[in-house]
Image (spheres, grey):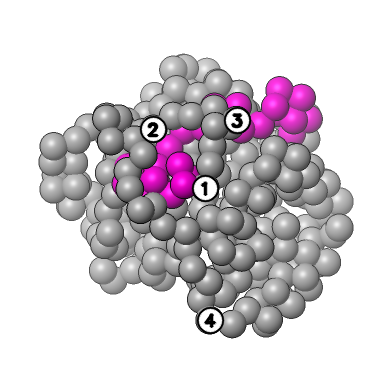
Amino acid sequence: MTMAERVERARALVERAGAPATLHRATEDLFPDVDGLPEVPLSELTVDGLASGIQHHGGMVVRGLLAPDQVEALRAQLQDGTLRAKQGGASSSEVDRMVAMLIDAYRAQGVLDLAERYLGEAPVGFPHRTVVKRNEPSAGLPWHQDASFFRGPCGSLDVWTALTECGRKCPSLWLVPRRIERILDESQTTVDASATVEDEMPEVLEGVEAVRPVLQPGDAILLDEMTVHRTGTGWKIPSREVAVTWFFAPSRLPAMTARPIAF
């Protein structure tokens, strides 16, 4: 399926969407004794566990979310660096192949089914937020919530998967391991969000310590738009490779200039 075809299918899903779907809610904390982020292997990941990890702890780590052969196949697509479609849906055969390969891997691993049960609808995404990329050392993004970029809460699911080892010689993500229910940047701007959140961090971190999970290839961090996080710093190797996908319910799709795509 080409990116253009994915855009058309997503448009139909959004047009058919009615009242906002019900996000799967955690009735209790299934990880009450965990300091930091809960961790489970993919074989033990359930929709209740996913809801509990994100809605009580701000996120969770899933070990082996992608299989070794899937990781290597995705890495092989990065001969020329990051593959990312444009916000308007413009792509190339290489990008189309990458997105199809990533989505096929999610489907085979049960991630698409899990996302649908968690979000309450068959998920859609955005082309520029469905990406396999090679990052080189940088200062990284400061503390932020993606809700600022999405113009408010939307009940999303982000799957951030390491394709190379992350956390020792190159960074994974720094996360605040607690649930934050309010948008720290009330103006919801993409320009000033990080600066505003930085001012709030002493209060946000009171009583907890930020964590940076160590991930092996195929391990993933699951979070949502309310999770307070920053991209890590402290590089000792030339690059890292990751796959990142944001999933949204069509009926709760954030207002963005990008066209959604279907999975």
- Reading the image, the residue beneath label 1 is 47
Q: Residue placed farthest to the front in the image?
A: 27
- Reading the image, the residue beneath label 2 is 38
The quarter of the image holding the C terminus is bottom right
Residue 164 is situated, as x and y percent measured from the top left of the image, at 60, 24
Q: Is residue 52 magenta?
A: yes
Q: Which residues are magenta?
A: 48-74
Name which residue type carries label 1. Val
In this image, 92 relative to 238: left or right?
A: right
Q: Is residue 130 magenta?
A: no
Compare marks 2 and 1 and give the one earlier in the sequence. 2
- Reading the image, the residue beneath label 3 is 43
Residue 75 is situated, as x and y percent measured from the top left of the image, at 72, 30
As measured in the structure, the alpha-carbon distance from the residue carrying label 2 to the one carrying label 3 is 15 Å
- At label 4, counting other C-alpha atoms closer than 10 Å, the crowd grade (few under 14, some 14-19, many 20 or more) is few
Q: Please name whichever residue, 38 or 131, is drawn nearer the observer in this view of the structure.
A: 38
As measured in the structure, the alpha-carbon distance from the residue carrying label 2 to the one carrying label 4 is 32 Å
- At label 2, counting other C-alpha atoms closer than 10 Å, the crowd grade (few under 14, some 14-19, many 20 or more) is many
Q: Residue at x 13, y 37 (%)?
A: 207
Q: Residue at x 74, y 77 (%)?
A: 12
Nearer to us: label 4 or label 1 = 1
Name which residue type carries label 2. Pro
